[in-house]
Amino acid sequence: MKHSNIPIFIQHMGCPNQCVFCDQHTITGAHSFCEASVRSDIDAALATMGERTCEIAYFGGSFTGIDREQMLRLLDLAQEYTERGAVCGIRLSTRPDYISPEIVEILLRYPICAVELGIQSMDERVLAACKRGHAAADTVQACALLRKAGIPFVGQMMTGLPGSDGQSELETAERICSMGACGARIYPCIVFQNTALADMTRKGLYSPLSVEEAVARSAAVLEIFDAHGVPCLKIGLHDGQGLHDPDTYFAGPHHPALGEMVRSRVFLYKIEAALDTVGPVREKSLQIAVPSGCVSMAVGQKKENKLRILEKTGAKSVKILENKALCGYNITIDVL
């Protein structure tokens, strides 16, 4: 059965400061939050869900930082739908420094499926450059509190932030895994108009990643999550999140298939690593098996992976096919 979220965007509510990259109004596609419409929004979404499980997801801000009474009302409302079996639980996004023993105690009263933590980076220099307003220690504490309470959490991180590099991002991914995340999201940094990051870019103080750089660095991060068995729920913003409007999008690695390109690059890395162990394959035929549903990703955009393998190895042909016994990014190679 398919799984979906019913997103209720509380754009930027509860956030104590403005990070240099942040424009939640553009990212969420909404410019105001109306609590009175939440019930009708949920009902309208449920009417289109069909046979699938779903969660009510309070996204787009720091949910645990909003007015306490409003937070409780929204949790109570979502719980109503859970109790009658319309949804399977509640998901919410928040900042690490807005997780406390008191907040955890409140969350334990409700059917919370996951807390999505906007970790972004575990590098103190990056956190300071982005004006996040908290330290890596706050993230460590938040994860420990959630893990001890048995509340699953997803670690959201960004690549290409001011002050970051590939090594910093790999270390952030490793820390997210070691702190016990049940899932991850990777967001290459996009520069939106009317943000401090746009001003930094204009002044030459920040250089956005190119699409190729974003793919390479995000793929390296994704390999970390895959190695630790932490599923990656999303890579990059949805294509419609203000990325086609020059009044909102300023610069950065925008591509409508960015997530698939990153996953495709991981398959390429896996195939290249496997080829290093099989010896010369020049003028031979390669048959590469990948998990079900992954052939197009393994072939690559415009067959770039397949063409790169042919060029690099001198193989006569490359055939990529499905193997239902495989999962994740596992592959097998037969030389014929």
Image (spheres, helix red, strand yellow):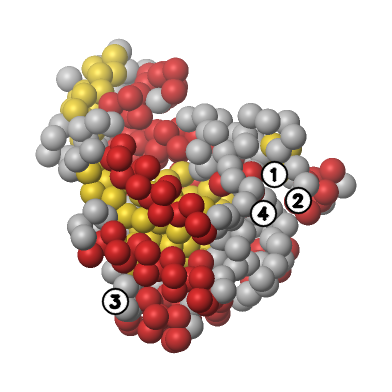
Assess whether mark 4 and mark 1 are in contact (beta carbons under 8 angstroms). Answer: no
Q: Looking at this view, is 203 or 307 the one in front?
A: 203
- What is the distance, in whole Å, between disc 3 and disc 1 at their CAs? 36 Å
Above or below, 218 against 181 in this view is above
Assess whether mark 1 and mark 2 are in contact (beta carbons under 8 angstroms). Answer: yes
Q: Is residue 133 visible?
A: yes
User: Which quadrant of the rendered structure holds the N terminus?
Assistant: top left
Q: Residue 320 at x, y = what percent? A: 25, 23
Mark 3 and mark 4 lie on one chain; the one further toward the N terminus is 4
Q: Nearer the viewer, mark 2 or mark 1?
A: 2
- What is the distance, in whole Å, between disc 2 and disc 4 at their CAs? 7 Å
User: What residue appears at the point 53 percent right and 48 percent down from the top-left corner?
Assistant: 187
**Residue highlighted by disc 2:** 195
Q: Residue 108 at x, y = what percent? A: 33, 78
**Residue highlighted by disc 1:** 191
**Residue highlighted by disc 3:** 150
Mark 2 and mark 3 lie on one chain; the one further toward the N terminus is 3
Mark 3 and mark 1 lie on one chain; the one further toward the N terminus is 3
- What is the distance, in whole Å, between disc 2 and disc 1 at their CAs? 8 Å
Assess whether mark 4 and mark 3 are in contact (beta carbons under 8 angstroms). Answer: no
Q: Residue 330 at x, y = what percent? A: 25, 42
Q: Quadrant of residue 103?
A: bottom left
User: What residue appears at the point 30 percent right and 13 percent down from the top-left corner?
Assistant: 316
User: What residue appears at the point 52 percent right and 62 percent down from the top-left corner?
Assistant: 118
Secondary structure at numbered mark 4: loop
Q: Residue 204 at x, y = what percent? A: 84, 46
Q: Is residue 309 left or right of residue 18?
A: left
